[in-house]
Image (cartoon, rainbow, N blue to C red):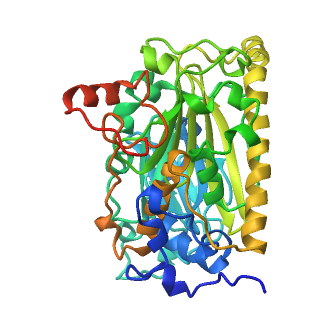
Amino acid sequence: MATSWTQPTAAWTQPESEFWAPNRNAVDESFAMAPAVYADEGFFADEQERLFGRAWVCVALTAELARPSRLLVRSIGGRSVLLARTDDGLVGFLNSCRHRGTELAEADCDIAQTIRCPYHRWHYSVDGRLVATPMFDSVPRDDFDPADFGLVPVRVDSWGPFVFACLNADTPPLAQWLGDLDERMAGYGFDEWQPATPSPADCTFEPAANWKLIFENFAEYYHLGWVHPELAKMSRVEDHHRYQGPGMYCGQTTTPISGDERDDWLTLPAADGLDASDAASGRFIALFPNVLIAVLPSHAFVMRLEPVSAGRTIEHCSFVFPPGTSPASDEAGAQQFAEAFEVTRRFWIDVNDEDIDICERAQRGIARGGAPPGPLAPRFEEPLNRFHKMTADLMTLETVAELAVPAGDRPGGIDLYGSDPNPMPPATEAAAASSAPEAPATATS
């Protein structure tokens, strides 16, 4: 008889429920999440409201909003959102006219500083003010003030080359959500990294897998030797270490990157001014809930996840580069850069194809088999334990204002399982370790 894994909707949204109990312990006592979390459409519907509807969701690269005339359309938690840039910065609004709710734009487009409703031609300025209502005052209404009917605002903020939006007013600010990432990534000068112009490498994939399986796959390296035998030559299992402080993210680093057998990641010039640790490492950040960032000394591979259904996700993939390493906008420079970058680009696409294949297989096994969840591997899957707890929190908190951002790993080896401390710790961890008392190693390290 097939295992039944469908749960009442209330089970995964109620704090007192035992649904999340197997995921709330330390990693050496925790289990994988229940099959319903990945395969049940009822869970997906609740997740859109409770998780994506209350999180800081990555929606674009800042370069996509470089021009004030550009209007982006994005989906967040099942709601359509408009994004634009004004003289005062980034803005966001619900994609809905204040007259009778018509969709204002159906896809990214250029505008002439005015957002016009296609139905009755109400006009809004880029900062959301209602500026024109054609023929509406042919019979005046005493109760109508255009100032009361601007577009409904959505919170928008940015970090580095990324734009984030949040539908919930109670969610902590983006800076609190990010935790120490701004400090942790400071040596890269991440604010200055941008896509190549024109970009040679943007691409989109649509795996038949739940977004959480893709997030988890990126966050752990347990599968590396079997799923990615070529990647494992540059990002060796024994060279993986934690890379996570306080914040809504999971992190790992390959220190050092190996170029002995494959040097696909090392074909482009590195950013200027990197310290010894950043210059020798690959940083892998899974920023909750939907952006995966692989940062190398010369480039970053970025994947923005857009959930479509319980069993389908769109991956928006792009590359960003340090200042001075991407080409000029002239045709000859772009062609030269594209040829030099092709080795790295092709390698990333091949690795992602391998990930898509195994994530789709995981989805099929969960949806069609639904075996009870197994135990997490402490050495390799601590980032998943961290991710599971963040997911459980967003799904069960009555108000996201109560959200507790995960604490970071402590200095030294106390939080490590089965591996040694990073021999070249990043600057943030080195500074913390030098100011902290020596910590004893765990019995399992």
Image spot of residue 75 (x, y percent): 60, 61
Q: Residue at x 79, y 58 (%)?
A: 361
Whether residue 405 can be seen here: yes
Residue that lies at the very extreme toward the front in this rendered image? 443
Q: Nearer the viewer, residue 71 or 275?
A: 275
Image spot of residue 404 (x, y percent): 31, 60
- The quadrant of the picture occupied by the N terminus is bottom right
Q: Nearer the viewer, residue 20 or 134?
A: 20
Q: Can you tell which quarter of the image residue 424 is in?
A: top left
Image spot of residue 187 (x, y percent): 40, 22
Image spot of residue 365 (x, y percent): 76, 66
- The quadrant of the picture occupied by the C terminus is top left
Q: Is residue 429 left or right of residue 23?
A: left
Residue 300, relative to residue 7: is it above or below?
above
Q: Is residue 362 left or right of residue 111?
A: right
Q: Nearer the viewer, residue 158 or 259?
A: 259
Residue 408, relative to residue 372: is it above or below?
above
Q: Is residue 56 left or right of residue 195?
A: left
Q: Residue at x 55, y 45 (%)?
A: 380
Q: Can you tell which quarter of the image residue 232 is in?
A: top right
Whether residue 132 can be seen here: no
Q: Is residue 38 left or right of residue 394?
A: right
